[in-house]
Image: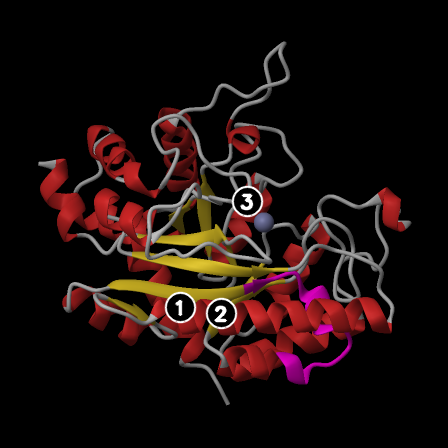
């Protein structure tokens, strides 16, 4: 029964990193968690591949290097996406059409607004290259916003802007204008709450979990979850062990797929099934026993079904909610 649901569902993983530089050929079986053969095998129909840039020095040279890297990664993701039985998609309509045609769907996004430097025009360039979202920060404050995890090695204190900077506020307005989704994973609570208040469009945490179940700075507390619901947003629960269960005596977190679905259950009870989704953070630290790579994606659907989620709810969790959010954000352009 859960096999049939899984086969019919447009399963979308909203956060998957790629190796950079020198990405392997994803059309072949690789040593990465995600490649096209593993997606086929696991029934993972769609992924958002990430143009990630680590936080570095915030000077002109640092910003230029980050901008160049993000743009090169976006172009790579797009170029390598199109092929036999797979397509690059930048809208909800394209994503659904790919699924209807039986093709795998590849989407892209930028992680770390630092890659914008101080040039708001880069946001439109990324959207034109097909990116669907921008994660405002990574670990370490940038010129847009404070991060949930500062980087003392870069001179960070606990907070720099007290949330969003003036530039960050301008970026939020520009992202609304051009239909680029605002991702608040990695952002400090102050940044996240201010972005939710300011944005005309709903926002998303593309790879975070629930702080009530695991007190990790990357997770969202109840007030943040409530804010996401109030603004029509989403939390995409992710398969990263340290966000799912506190570490044991050995320093390792013993999280499994059951723990991940505990976080899904918690978020659904708190803010409703219309505001929750799923992601892996594969190849960026994610992967747990039972969902260690894209080839095992069926196990997550099976656990959801075992907990009582039916075909409709499983569709909402896997992509129905995210497709609705894409349409809201992309329909508010102009
Ligand atoms: Zn991340």
Quick check: can you spot residue 201? no
Assign a secondary structure to mark 1: helix
Residue behind mark 1: 80
Q: Taking 45 as reference, is 122 above or below it?
A: below
Counting residues from the start of the chain, the first of labels 3 and 1 encountered is 1
Nearer the observer: mark 3 or 1; the answer is: 1
Q: Is residue 143 left or right of residue 189?
A: right
First to last magenta residue range: 110-122
Assign a secondary structure to mark 2: helix
Label 3 to label 2: alpha-carbon separation? 18 Å
Q: Is residue 73 left or right of residue 143?
A: left
Within 8 Å: ligand 1 and the Cβ of disc 3? yes
Q: Nearer the viewer, residue 64 or 315?
A: 64
Whether residue 111 is in magenta: the answer is yes
Q: Is residue 182 left or right of residue 40?
A: right
Q: Taking 230 as reference, is 43 above or below it?
A: above
Quick check: can you spot residue 3? yes
User: Which residue is at the far right?
Assistant: 155
Assign a secondary structure to mark 3: loop
Residue behind mark 3: 284
Packing grade of label 1 (10 A; few <14, some 14-19, many >=20) is some
């Amino acid at each position: 029964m859960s096999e049939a649901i899984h086969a019919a569902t447009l399963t979308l993983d909203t956060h998957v990193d790629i190796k950079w530089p020198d990405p392997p050929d994803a059309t072949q079986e690789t040593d990465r968690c995600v490649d096209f053969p593993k997606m086929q095998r696991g029934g993972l129909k769609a992924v958002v591949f990430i143009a990630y840039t680590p936080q570095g020095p915030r000077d002109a040279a640092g910003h230029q290097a980050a901008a160049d890297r993000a743009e090169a990664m976006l172009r790579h993701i797009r170029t390598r996406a199109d092929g036999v039985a797979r397509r690059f998609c930048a809208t909800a309509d394209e994503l659904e059409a790919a699924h209807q045609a039986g093709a795998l769907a590849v989407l892209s996004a930028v992680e770390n607004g630092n890659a914008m430097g101080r040039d708001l025009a880069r946001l439109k360039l990324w959207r034109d290259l097909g990116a669907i979202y921008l994660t405002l920060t990574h670990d370490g404050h940038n010129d847009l916003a404070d991060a949930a995890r500062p980087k003392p090695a870069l001179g960070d204190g606990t907070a720099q802007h007290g949330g969003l900077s003036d530039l960050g506020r301008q970026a939020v307005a520009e992202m609304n204008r051009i239909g680029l989704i605002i991702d608040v994973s990695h952002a400090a609570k102050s940044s996240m709450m201010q972005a939710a208040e300011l944005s005309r469009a709903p926002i998303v945490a593309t790879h975070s979990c629930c702080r009530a179940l695991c007190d990790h700075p990357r997770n969202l507390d109840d007030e943040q979850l409530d804010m996401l619901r109030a603004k029509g947003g989403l939390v995409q629960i992710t398969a990263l062990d340290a966000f799912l269960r506190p570490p044991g005596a050995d320093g390792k977190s013993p999280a499994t797929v059951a723990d991940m679905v505990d976080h899904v259950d918690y978020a659904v009870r708190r803010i409703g099934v219309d505001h929750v989704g799923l992601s892996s953070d594969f190849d960026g630290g994610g992967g747990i026993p039972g969902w260690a790579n894209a080839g095992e994606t069926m196990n997550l659907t099976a656990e959801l079904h075992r907990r009582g989620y039916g075909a409709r709810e499983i569709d909402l969790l896997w992509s129905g909610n995210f497709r609705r959010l894409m349409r809201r954000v992309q329909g508010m352009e102009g």
